[in-house]
Image (tube, rainbow, N blue to C red):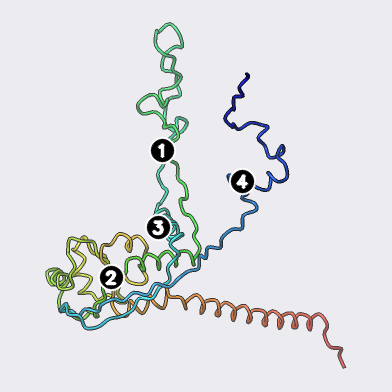
């Protein structure tokens, strides 16, 4: 008596759904739901510029807390903030390069016109000039030449990079009252004592942003190597990122809120629209004048 042996099911060409009946095909479930990328609907990810509001304490010249203020500046989205700040700092550092490095090639080095020794019968490697790059005093291969390293960055992008850096440094920022008239004479020791009263270690890198610099403040702080005293004219991205502590005055906070706040761009755009409108009116008037000159009125 022959016994039937059942073989275990296996995946083969004949296990395809083509060979199934209609009832079996309805009970089939796909193992993987495949959908090409071209048919997938992209998820909208808003990258709108947000405003970072930070509460900062205001300290007196003696180090006592006398109030609070708010720093409200624009900040790039987390997805692009690192790239925006990186592009801003690379632009600043690269534009500082003078690009005057220069070397001489073998054609520019003085001398070397005579063949040093005959081509053959010396047992040495053949040489055609003493100014070959293989010899001391010879030319330089692929050496630097004067070039322009400057790169361009949009004004709005540069402004956004600075405001993003200021917003990210808000946790290490304090506000002090105006101390321009507190120093009767230049003395570095008095400025270091003021730093300690404000909770700043003189060995840490700190950046001060003030609207105006008095002579005594400049002379008292210039011998402190870890301190940078800046004004709105000299404010730059590198010093913001390089500092461990940011110190602002109340006027400087108002300047940052007005210059790098959300409302600054709207005012700028309104001003551009007004200027554009005025230009169109002047152009129409000028065209009318030209037309009047071309067609003068007949003489009576």
Q: Mark 4 points at which residue?
A: 30
**Of pointers 3 and 4, the one earlier in the residue sequence:** 4
Q: How far apart are marks 1 and 3 (CA)?
A: 29 Å
State which quadrant residue 220 falls in: bottom left
**In x, y percent, where is residue 283?**
69, 79
User: Is 249 rendered above or below residue 172?
Assistant: below
Question: Can you say which quadrant of the picture contains the N terminus?
Answer: top right
Q: Pick the residue in front: 86 or 39.
A: 39
The alpha-carbon separation of the residues under discs 3 and 4 comes to: 52 Å
Q: Which mark is residue 173?
A: 2
Q: Which mark is residue 103?
A: 1
**Among the two numbered marks 1 and 3 on one chain, the one whose residue lies closer to the N terminus:** 3
Q: How far apart are marks 4 and 1 (CA)?
A: 68 Å
**Nearest-to-viewer mark from 1 and 3:** 3
Q: Which residue is drawn at 17% across and 60% down?
A: 203
Q: Are the residues flagged by discs 4 and 2 in contact, CB closer than 8 Å? A: no
Q: Are marks 1 and 3 in contact (CB under 8 Å)?
A: no
Left or right: 255, with 224 as reference point: right
Q: Earlier in the sequence, mark 2 or mark 1?
A: 1
Instruction: Name the residue rendered at 86%, 90% in the picture.
Output: 299
């Amino acid at each position: 008596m022959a016994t039937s042996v059942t073989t275990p099911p296996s995946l083969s060409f004949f296990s395809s759904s083509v060979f199934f009946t209609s009832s079996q095909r309805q009970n089939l479930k796909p193992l993987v739901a495949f959908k090409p990328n071209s048919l997938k609907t992209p998820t909208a990810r808003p990258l709108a510029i947000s405003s970072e509001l930070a509460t900062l304490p205001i300290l007196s010249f003696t180090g006592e807390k006398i109030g609070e203020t708010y720093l409200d500046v624009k900040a790039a989205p987390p997805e692009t903030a690192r790239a925006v700040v990186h592009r801003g700092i690379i632009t600043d550092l690269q534009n500082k390069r003078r690009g005057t490095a220069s070397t001489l090639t073998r054609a520019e080095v003085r001398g070397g016109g005579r063949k040093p020794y005959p081509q053959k019968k010396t047992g040495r490697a053949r040489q055609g000039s003493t100014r070959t790059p293989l010899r001391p005093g010879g030319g330089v291969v692929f050496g630097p030449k004067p070039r322009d390293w400057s790169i361009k960055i949009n004004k709005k992008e540069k402004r956004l990079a600075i405001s993003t850096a200021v917003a990210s440094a808000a946790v290490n920022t304090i506000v002090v009252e105006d101390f321009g008239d507190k120093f009767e004479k230049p003395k570095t020791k008095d400025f270091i004592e003021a730093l300690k009263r404000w909770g700043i270690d003189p060995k840490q890198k700190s950046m001060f942003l003030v609207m105006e610099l008095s002579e005594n403040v400049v002379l008292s702080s210039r011998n402190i190597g870890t301190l940078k005293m800046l004004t709105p004219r000299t404010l730059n991205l590198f010093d913001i990122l390089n500092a461990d502590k940011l110190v602002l005055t109340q006027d400087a906070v108002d300047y940052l809120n007005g210059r790098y706040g959300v409302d600054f761009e709207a005012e700028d755009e309104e001003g551009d629209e007004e200027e554009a409108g005025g230009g169109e009116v002047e152009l129409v008037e000028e065209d009318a004048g030209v037309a009047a000159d071309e067609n003068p009125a007949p003489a009576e």
